Amino acid sequence: MSYEAISVFDILKIGVGPSSSHTLGPWRAAQKFVQSLSDRNLLQQVNAVRVLLYGSLAKTGKGHGTDIAIQLGLCGEDPVTFDVQSINSRIADIAAMKELVLGGLHEVQFDPREDIEFLYSESLPYHPNAVTFLADGKNGEAISETYYSVGGGFVVKEGEKRSSAGEIQLPFPINTSNDILHWCMKTGMSISEVVMENENAWRPEKQTREGVLNIWKVMSECIYRGCHTEGILPGGLNVKRRAAELNKKLLGGKKYHDYQSWIATIRSGGNSFKYTLDWVSCFALAVNEENASFGRVVTAPTNGAAGVIPAVLHYHIVFGDDPDSYRDDDKIIRFLLTASEIGSIFKKGATLSAAMGGCQAEIGVSSAMAAAALAESMGGTQKQALMASEIAMEHHLGLTCDPIGGLVQVPCIERNTMGAIKAITAAQLALQGSPDYAKVSLDAVIKTMWDTAKDMNTKYKETADGGLAINVPLSLPEC
C-alpha cells in the first residue's frame, strides 16, 4: 500500500511566529541550504549570498517576517531553541555590519536591503511559496538551490524526489479517514491508540509521550504568556493586544500566582455559556497575539491557526468535570495524537497552505483537528470523532486568506477564536448525532476542500491582493 508516513511531530512543531509557511518554512529552507553547502564542503568557499522570494512569499513576506526568518536560518539558528527576545537585535546587527555568519561558522557579505529580493510579480510553477538561494564561491562558482514552503512548516527542495524505499513502515498506514476507521474497527482501538501504535514505529512510546507533553507545555505557556502581556502588536497596523485585558476583566481582580492557580481561579467563576465562551476566545486570542509578536508557538497545523487547538484543549481541561485534568497526561496526549492524525490526512488529501487553499487550509483544518480530538476526549466513538471533524471543516469551506498588510493579525487572530468555537460546536453536534445517518463523510469534505482550493482566485490565497486586505485602510487600529 502506498502511503506517506507523517508523525505527530511533523504536524505539531515548536517554532517562532508569525507564519509556518512564511516564517518557519523559509527558516528551515535556509538551514537546509546551509547544510547542503556544508555537506558539499562549500561553506567556507562562499563570498556572498543572495535570496530571491517568489509569489506569496514575496507579496506577504515582509508582514510575515520571511526576510527575518531567512537571515536567522542562514546564521544556523534553530527556531525551536532560538531566544525570541534576541530577534530584533540580531537582525539589526546583520543590517549594520552588512554581513552574517553563515551556519554560525563563516562570515560572508550580506546586506538584507540588497541581497533579499522580493519578486512580487513572479511565481514558480510548483508552489506559490518559493525561495531561491544564490551563493558566490571564491573560485567563481555560482551555487543555486530552490525550496518550496508547502504549508505547516513543511519544506520541499526543487528536484529532490522523496524516496519510499527507506521510509518507515507503519503498522497502520493511513491516507484517508476511511483508513482510520478501517484500522479502528479491525483492532477495536480508538483513533489516538492507533496513532500511538504508529508513533511506536519511530521511537519508544516513552519518548513520544514526553515529546507530546512538551508540545502541550509550549502551548500552555503560550496561552498564559499571551493572557498576561499587554501592548501593541508589531508591523504597523497598531492592533492592540486584547487577551490580557479580557483576562483581567473576566477574573475581576481575583488573585493567583502561577499557571495552576490561574486555572483554579478561572474554574471558580463557574461554567455559564457566556463565561466559557469568553474564555475560549481569550485563550485563542492569547496564542495568536503571541504568534503575531514573533513569540514561541506550536504550529498546529500552521502558525496562522496556532490558537485553535490550544484553546479547545485548554477549554476541555479547564471546564471539564475533573478539576485536576490539567495534570492528566493521558488526556492531553490522546487529544493531541488524534488532532495530529486529522491534520495529517488533510495534508495528504488537500493542503495545509493558505497560499494554495486560502484560510480553509489553516483555520478550517485546525478546527477540524480540534473537533475530532475533543469528540474522542469526551467519550465519542471513532465515527463520532470523524463526524465532528467533517462538520467543522464543512463550515469553513471557501474561507479566504486576505491578511491586511500581509500581517497575521487582521482577520487572522479573531479567526482563531471562531475556529475554536466551531470545533466545540462540531464536537457537540457529533456527540449528539448518529454518524451512520450522516450525508457527508470526512473524505468527501477533504476532497471538496481541495476542489475549492483549486478553483479559488489567487488573490484570496495569502497574497494581500483581495478581500479585507484591499478594502480596509491600513490606518485602522482594529478589525
Image: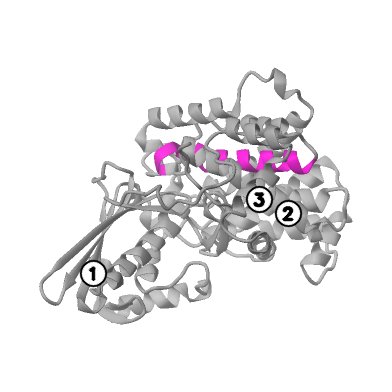
**Residue 373 drawn in magenta:** yes
Segment colored magenta: 355-378
Foreground mark, 2 or 3?
A: 3
Q: Is the C-beta separation of discs 1 and 3 under 8 Å?
A: no
Q: Quadrant of the C terminus?
A: top right
Taking 260 as reference, is 69 left or right? left
Amino acid type of the residue that numbered disc 3 sits on in the rendered structure:
Met
Q: Earlier in the sequence, mark 1 or mark 2?
A: 1
In this view, the residue farthest toward the left is 140
Separation of disc 1 and disc 3 at Cα?
A: 43 Å
Taking 253 as reference, is 296 left or right? left
According to the picture, the residue beneath numbered tag 2 turns out to be 332
Crowding near the residue tagged with mark 3, few <14, some 14–19, many ≥20 C-alpha atoms within 10 Å: many
Q: Earlier in the sequence, mark 1 or mark 3?
A: 1
Amino acid type of the residue that numbered disc 2 sits on in the rendered structure:
Ile
According to the picture, the residue beneath numbered tag 3 turns out to be 196
Q: Say which residue appears at 89% left-offset and 56% top-offset.
A: 268
Magenta residues, dominant SS class: helix
Crowding near the residue tagged with mark 2, few <14, some 14–19, many ≥20 C-alpha atoms within 10 Å: many
Crowding near the residue tagged with mark 1, few <14, some 14–19, many ≥20 C-alpha atoms within 10 Å: many
SS type, badge 3 = helix
Q: Position of residue 454 (x, y in %)?
A: 39, 30
SS type, badge 1 = strand
Separation of disc 2 and disc 3 at Cα?
A: 13 Å
**Way the structure is coloured:** one colour
Viewer-proximal residue, 369 or 209?
Answer: 209
According to the picture, the residue beneath numbered tag 1 turns out to be 49
Amino acid type of the residue that numbered disc 1 sits on in the rendered structure:
Val
The vertical placement of 346 against 68, above or below, is: above
Q: Position of residue 103 (x, y in %)?
A: 35, 75
SS type, badge 2 = helix
Q: Earlier in the sequence, mark 2 or mark 3?
A: 3
